[in-house]
Protein backbone atom coordinates (compact mmCIF):
# COMPACT_ATOMS: atom_id res chain seq x y z
CA UNK A 1 0.00 0.00 0.00
CA UNK A 2 1.32 3.45 -0.93
CA UNK A 3 1.86 5.68 2.13
CA UNK A 4 -0.31 8.81 2.34
CA UNK A 5 2.78 11.03 2.45
CA UNK A 6 6.18 10.31 1.00
CA UNK A 7 9.31 11.96 -0.31
CA UNK A 8 10.15 11.24 -3.94
CA UNK A 9 13.27 12.08 -5.89
CA UNK A 10 12.48 14.22 -8.95
CA UNK A 11 15.61 14.89 -10.99
CA UNK A 12 17.71 15.17 -7.85
CA UNK A 13 15.26 17.21 -5.78
CA UNK A 14 13.27 15.81 -2.87
CA UNK A 15 9.57 16.53 -3.28
CA UNK A 16 6.96 15.67 -0.68
CA UNK A 17 3.85 14.16 -2.25
CA UNK A 18 0.67 12.93 -0.64
CA UNK A 19 -2.61 11.18 -1.45
CA UNK A 20 -1.56 10.24 -4.98
CA UNK A 21 -4.73 8.19 -5.34
CA UNK A 22 -6.95 11.25 -4.77
CA UNK A 23 -9.39 11.76 -7.66
CA UNK A 24 -8.90 15.24 -9.08
CA UNK A 25 -11.45 14.92 -11.92
CA UNK A 26 -14.45 12.89 -10.69
CA UNK A 27 -16.08 12.79 -14.14
CA UNK A 28 -13.23 10.68 -15.51
CA UNK A 29 -11.52 9.39 -12.37
CA UNK A 30 -8.22 11.13 -13.17
CA UNK A 31 -6.08 11.00 -10.02
CA UNK A 32 -3.35 13.23 -8.67
CA UNK A 33 -0.78 10.63 -9.75
CA UNK A 34 -2.16 10.77 -13.30
CA UNK A 35 -1.99 14.59 -13.26
CA UNK A 36 1.70 14.29 -12.33
CA UNK A 37 2.24 11.71 -15.06
CA UNK A 38 0.83 14.13 -17.63
CA UNK A 39 3.19 16.84 -16.39
CA UNK A 40 6.16 14.49 -16.71
CA UNK A 41 5.25 13.88 -20.36
CA UNK A 42 4.89 17.54 -21.32
CA UNK A 43 7.43 19.07 -18.93
CA UNK A 44 9.97 20.42 -21.48
CA UNK A 45 7.27 22.23 -23.49
CA UNK A 46 5.40 23.48 -20.42
CA UNK A 47 8.57 24.67 -18.68
CA UNK A 48 9.55 26.61 -21.81
CA UNK A 49 6.28 28.56 -21.46
CA UNK A 50 6.78 29.09 -17.71
CA UNK A 51 10.43 30.16 -17.92
CA UNK A 52 11.07 33.37 -15.94
CA UNK A 53 7.35 34.10 -15.56
CA UNK A 54 5.82 34.25 -12.05
CA UNK A 55 3.08 31.65 -11.72
CA UNK A 56 -0.37 32.30 -10.31
CA UNK A 57 -1.94 29.00 -9.37
CA UNK A 58 -5.59 28.01 -9.14
CA UNK A 59 -5.81 25.23 -6.59
CA UNK A 60 -8.43 22.56 -6.00
CA UNK A 61 -7.21 20.74 -2.90
CA UNK A 62 -9.94 18.06 -3.18
CA UNK A 63 -10.44 17.92 -6.94
CA UNK A 64 -12.48 19.99 -9.36
CA UNK A 65 -15.74 19.39 -7.55
CA UNK A 66 -14.38 21.14 -4.47
CA UNK A 67 -13.79 24.78 -3.61
CA UNK A 68 -11.01 26.47 -5.56
CA UNK A 69 -8.80 29.42 -4.71
CA UNK A 70 -6.28 31.64 -6.47
CA UNK A 71 -2.78 31.85 -5.07
CA UNK A 72 -0.19 34.42 -6.13
CA UNK A 73 2.25 34.34 -3.23
CA UNK A 74 4.63 31.51 -2.47
CA UNK A 75 2.86 29.50 0.26
CA UNK A 76 4.34 28.76 3.63
CA UNK A 77 6.26 25.53 3.69
CA UNK A 78 7.31 25.71 0.05
CA UNK A 79 10.66 24.00 -0.53
CA UNK A 80 13.61 26.36 -0.37
CA UNK A 81 14.57 25.37 -3.91
CA UNK A 82 11.40 26.97 -5.34
CA UNK A 83 12.71 30.21 -6.85
CA UNK A 84 10.84 33.34 -5.80
CA UNK A 85 11.04 37.09 -6.30
CA UNK A 86 9.48 39.89 -4.29
CA UNK A 87 7.65 42.18 -6.72
CA UNK A 88 5.05 44.90 -6.35
CA UNK A 89 1.60 44.15 -7.73
CA UNK A 90 1.11 45.95 -11.04
CA UNK A 91 -1.03 49.07 -11.43
CA UNK A 92 -4.63 48.07 -11.99
CA UNK A 93 -4.39 44.88 -9.95
CA UNK A 94 -6.74 44.33 -7.01
CA UNK A 95 -3.69 44.34 -4.74
CA UNK A 96 -1.98 47.22 -6.58
CA UNK A 97 1.25 48.28 -4.90
CA UNK A 98 1.38 45.36 -2.48
CA UNK A 99 4.62 43.42 -2.17
CA UNK A 100 4.18 39.84 -3.34
CA UNK A 101 6.61 36.95 -3.06
CA UNK A 102 5.94 35.27 -6.39
CA UNK A 103 7.12 31.74 -7.23
CA UNK A 104 8.68 30.49 -10.45
CA UNK A 105 8.48 26.89 -11.63
CA UNK A 106 11.85 26.13 -13.16
CA UNK A 107 11.90 22.34 -13.39
CA UNK A 108 9.90 19.14 -13.22
CA UNK A 109 10.25 19.07 -9.45
CA UNK A 110 8.47 22.42 -9.29
CA UNK A 111 5.65 21.10 -11.46
CA UNK A 112 5.23 18.04 -9.23
CA UNK A 113 5.27 20.26 -6.11
CA UNK A 114 2.52 22.46 -7.58
CA UNK A 115 0.44 19.46 -8.66
CA UNK A 116 0.71 17.94 -5.20
CA UNK A 117 -0.95 21.10 -3.87
CA UNK A 118 -3.85 20.70 -6.28
CA UNK A 119 -2.62 23.53 -8.53
CA UNK A 120 -4.24 22.30 -11.73
CA UNK A 121 -4.21 25.65 -13.55
CA UNK A 122 -0.99 27.62 -14.01
CA UNK A 123 -1.45 31.23 -15.14
CA UNK A 124 1.34 33.56 -16.28
CA UNK A 125 1.77 37.16 -17.50
CA UNK A 126 3.05 38.21 -20.92
CA UNK A 127 6.32 39.53 -19.40
CA UNK A 128 9.33 37.86 -17.85
CA UNK A 129 11.42 38.73 -14.79
CA UNK A 130 15.22 39.02 -14.83
CA UNK A 131 17.54 37.35 -12.29
CA UNK A 132 17.66 40.51 -10.13
CA UNK A 133 13.91 41.08 -10.20
CA UNK A 134 13.66 43.46 -13.16
CA UNK A 135 10.34 43.16 -14.98
CA UNK A 136 11.09 43.09 -18.70
CA UNK A 137 8.89 44.41 -21.47
CA UNK A 138 6.38 41.90 -22.88
CA UNK A 139 7.89 39.29 -25.20
CA UNK A 140 4.55 38.05 -26.48
CA UNK A 141 1.12 39.39 -27.38
CA UNK A 142 -1.93 37.30 -26.52
CA UNK A 143 -5.42 37.60 -27.96
CA UNK A 144 -8.19 35.69 -26.21
CA UNK A 145 -11.15 34.58 -28.34
CA UNK A 146 -14.24 34.04 -26.20
CA UNK A 147 -17.42 32.80 -27.91
CA UNK A 148 -20.85 33.98 -26.82
CA UNK A 149 -23.45 31.20 -27.03
CA UNK A 150 -24.54 29.76 -29.35
CA UNK A 151 -21.17 30.49 -30.96
CA UNK A 152 -18.42 27.99 -30.16
CA UNK A 153 -15.02 26.82 -31.35
CA UNK A 154 -16.01 26.82 -35.03
CA UNK A 155 -16.73 30.54 -34.83
CA UNK A 156 -13.52 31.11 -32.86
CA UNK A 157 -11.55 29.31 -35.57
CA UNK A 158 -12.89 31.64 -38.26
CA UNK A 159 -12.04 34.73 -36.21
CA UNK A 160 -8.60 33.30 -35.36
CA UNK A 161 -7.67 33.42 -39.03
CA UNK A 162 -8.81 37.04 -39.28
CA UNK A 163 -6.68 38.02 -36.29
CA UNK A 164 -3.64 36.04 -37.41
CA UNK A 165 -3.78 37.59 -40.88
CA UNK A 166 -3.84 41.07 -39.34
CA UNK A 167 -0.93 40.33 -37.00
CA UNK A 168 1.05 38.93 -39.92
CA UNK A 169 0.37 42.09 -41.95
CA UNK A 170 1.73 44.09 -39.02
CA UNK A 171 4.95 42.07 -39.03
CA UNK A 172 4.50 40.13 -35.80
CA UNK A 173 5.70 36.83 -37.21
CA UNK A 174 4.25 33.38 -36.65
CA UNK A 175 1.13 33.30 -34.46
CA UNK A 176 0.45 30.10 -32.50
CA UNK A 177 -3.19 29.15 -31.83
CA UNK A 178 -4.05 27.48 -28.51
CA UNK A 179 -7.41 25.89 -27.79
CA UNK A 180 -8.01 27.04 -24.22
CA UNK A 181 -9.31 23.85 -22.64
CA UNK A 182 -12.45 25.80 -21.75
CA UNK A 183 -14.78 27.45 -24.30
CA UNK A 184 -12.54 29.35 -26.68
CA UNK A 185 -8.94 29.81 -27.70
CA UNK A 186 -5.94 32.12 -27.53
CA UNK A 187 -3.49 33.36 -30.14
CA UNK A 188 0.12 34.10 -29.21
CA UNK A 189 2.44 36.26 -31.29
CA UNK A 190 6.11 36.90 -30.44
CA UNK A 191 7.18 40.48 -29.73
CA UNK A 192 10.63 42.01 -30.22
CA UNK A 193 10.59 43.51 -26.72
CA UNK A 194 10.93 47.17 -27.76
CA UNK A 195 7.39 48.26 -26.80
CA UNK A 196 6.06 49.00 -23.35
CA UNK A 197 3.29 46.88 -21.91
CA UNK A 198 0.77 49.70 -22.29
CA UNK A 199 1.77 50.26 -25.92
CA UNK A 200 1.13 46.57 -26.60
CA UNK A 201 -2.20 46.73 -24.77
CA UNK A 202 -3.27 49.71 -26.89
CA UNK A 203 -2.17 47.95 -30.08
CA UNK A 204 -4.18 44.84 -29.16
CA UNK A 205 -7.20 47.02 -28.45
CA UNK A 206 -6.90 48.80 -31.79
CA UNK A 207 -6.66 45.47 -33.66
CA UNK A 208 -9.72 44.11 -31.85
CA UNK A 209 -11.85 47.18 -32.55
CA UNK A 210 -10.80 47.36 -36.20
CA UNK A 211 -11.62 43.69 -36.84
CA UNK A 212 -14.93 44.07 -35.00
CA UNK A 213 -15.81 47.08 -37.15
CA UNK A 214 -14.96 45.17 -40.34
CA UNK A 215 -16.84 42.00 -39.30
CA UNK A 216 -19.71 43.14 -37.07
CA UNK A 217 -21.75 39.96 -37.63
CA UNK A 218 -18.93 37.77 -36.28
CA UNK A 219 -16.91 39.81 -33.82
CA UNK A 220 -17.24 42.14 -30.84
CA UNK A 221 -14.49 43.96 -28.97
CA UNK A 222 -16.62 45.17 -26.04
CA UNK A 223 -17.12 42.89 -23.05
CA UNK A 224 -20.82 43.67 -22.48
CA UNK A 225 -22.56 40.29 -22.40
CA UNK A 226 -25.72 41.53 -24.08
CA UNK A 227 -23.68 42.29 -27.23
CA UNK A 228 -21.95 38.93 -27.46
CA UNK A 229 -24.68 36.44 -28.35
CA UNK A 230 -23.57 34.32 -31.31
CA UNK A 231 -20.37 36.34 -31.73
CA UNK A 232 -16.75 36.02 -30.70
CA UNK A 233 -15.26 38.51 -28.27
CA UNK A 234 -11.68 39.50 -29.13
CA UNK A 235 -10.44 40.05 -25.59
CA UNK A 236 -7.43 42.32 -25.89
CA UNK A 237 -7.26 43.06 -22.15
CA UNK A 238 -5.03 40.08 -21.31
CA UNK A 239 -2.06 42.25 -22.30
CA UNK A 240 -2.55 44.50 -19.27
CA UNK A 241 0.45 44.31 -16.87
CA UNK A 242 -1.83 43.08 -14.06
CA UNK A 243 -3.39 40.25 -16.09
CA UNK A 244 -2.36 36.64 -16.49
CA UNK A 245 -3.45 33.99 -19.00
CA UNK A 246 -3.69 30.22 -18.76
CA UNK A 247 -0.25 28.88 -19.67
CA UNK A 248 -0.06 26.70 -22.80
CA UNK A 249 0.09 23.00 -21.80
CA UNK A 250 -1.55 23.68 -18.43
CA UNK A 251 -4.50 21.55 -17.42
CA UNK A 252 -7.84 23.26 -16.81
CA UNK A 253 -9.98 22.84 -13.71
CA UNK A 254 -13.18 21.86 -15.52
CA UNK A 255 -15.41 18.81 -15.03
CA UNK A 256 -13.63 16.97 -17.84
CA UNK A 257 -9.83 17.33 -17.94
CA UNK A 258 -8.87 19.42 -20.93
CA UNK A 259 -5.62 21.25 -21.67
CA UNK A 260 -4.68 24.68 -23.00
CA UNK A 261 -3.37 22.96 -26.11
CA UNK A 262 -1.08 24.54 -28.75
CA UNK A 263 -2.34 23.66 -32.23
CA UNK A 264 -1.17 23.66 -35.83
CA UNK A 265 -2.88 26.11 -38.16
CA UNK A 266 -4.21 23.42 -40.49
CA UNK A 267 -6.38 22.22 -37.58
CA UNK A 268 -8.04 25.60 -37.09
CA UNK A 269 -11.32 25.18 -38.91
CA UNK A 270 -14.73 23.50 -38.69
CA UNK A 271 -14.96 20.63 -36.24
CA UNK A 272 -12.24 21.93 -33.92
CA UNK A 273 -12.40 20.35 -30.46
CA UNK A 274 -10.74 20.88 -27.09
CA UNK A 275 -8.07 18.28 -26.26
CA UNK A 276 -7.46 16.13 -23.20
CA UNK A 277 -4.12 15.41 -21.51
CA UNK A 278 -3.50 12.04 -23.18
CA UNK A 279 -4.13 13.53 -26.62
CA UNK A 280 -1.81 16.47 -25.94
CA UNK A 281 1.00 14.28 -24.63
CA UNK A 282 0.73 11.95 -27.63
CA UNK A 283 0.69 14.81 -30.13
CA UNK A 284 3.71 16.41 -28.50
CA UNK A 285 5.68 13.16 -28.66
CA UNK A 286 4.66 12.45 -32.26
CA UNK A 287 4.83 15.87 -33.84
CA UNK A 288 6.57 18.26 -31.49
CA UNK A 289 5.64 21.63 -30.07
CA UNK A 290 3.96 24.23 -32.32
CA UNK A 291 5.76 26.93 -30.28
CA UNK A 292 9.12 25.42 -31.24
Image (spheres, rainbow, N blue to C red):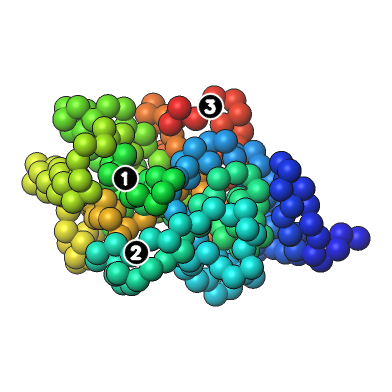
Disc 3 crowd, CA 10 A, few/some/many (<14, 14-19, 20+): few
Find residue 166 and report its horizontal and vertical position in percent: 18, 33
Residue located 26% across and 32% down the image:
192
Residue located 56% across and 31% down the image:
284
Ranked by sequence position, the earlier of labels 3 and 1 is 1
Quadrant of image for the N terminus: bottom right
Residues at marks 3 and 1, CA–CA distance in whole angstroms: 28 Å
Picture disc at residue 88:
2
CB of mark 2 within 8 Å of CB of mark 3? Answer: no
Ranked by sequence position, the earlier of labels 2 and 1 is 2
Camera-side residue of 268 and 242? 242
**Secondary structure of residue under mark 2:** strand
**Residue under circle 1?**
136
Q: In which quarter of the view is residue 43 placed?
A: top right
Camera-side residue of 91 and 251? 91
Residue located 39% across and 26% down the image:
266
Ranked by sequence position, the earlier of labels 2 and 3 is 2
**Secondary structure of residue under mark 1:** loop
Camera-side residue of 18 and 269? 18
**Residue under circle 3?**
288
**Secondary structure of residue under mark 3:** loop
Q: How many marks?
A: 3
Find residue 111 and report its horizontal and vertical position in percent: 60, 50
Side (left or right) of 112 relative to 49: right
Task: Nearest to the eye among marks 2 and 3: give it.
Answer: 2
Amino acid sequence: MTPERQMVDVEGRQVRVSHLEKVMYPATGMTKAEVMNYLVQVAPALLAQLRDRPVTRIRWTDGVGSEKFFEKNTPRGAPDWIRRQTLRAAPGAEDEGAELELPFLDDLAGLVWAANQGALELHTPQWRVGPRGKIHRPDRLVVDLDPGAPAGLDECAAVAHLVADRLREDGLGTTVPVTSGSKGMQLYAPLPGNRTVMEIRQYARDVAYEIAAAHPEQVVAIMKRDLRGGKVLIDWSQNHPAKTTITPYSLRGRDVPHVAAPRWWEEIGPGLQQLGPDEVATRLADRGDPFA
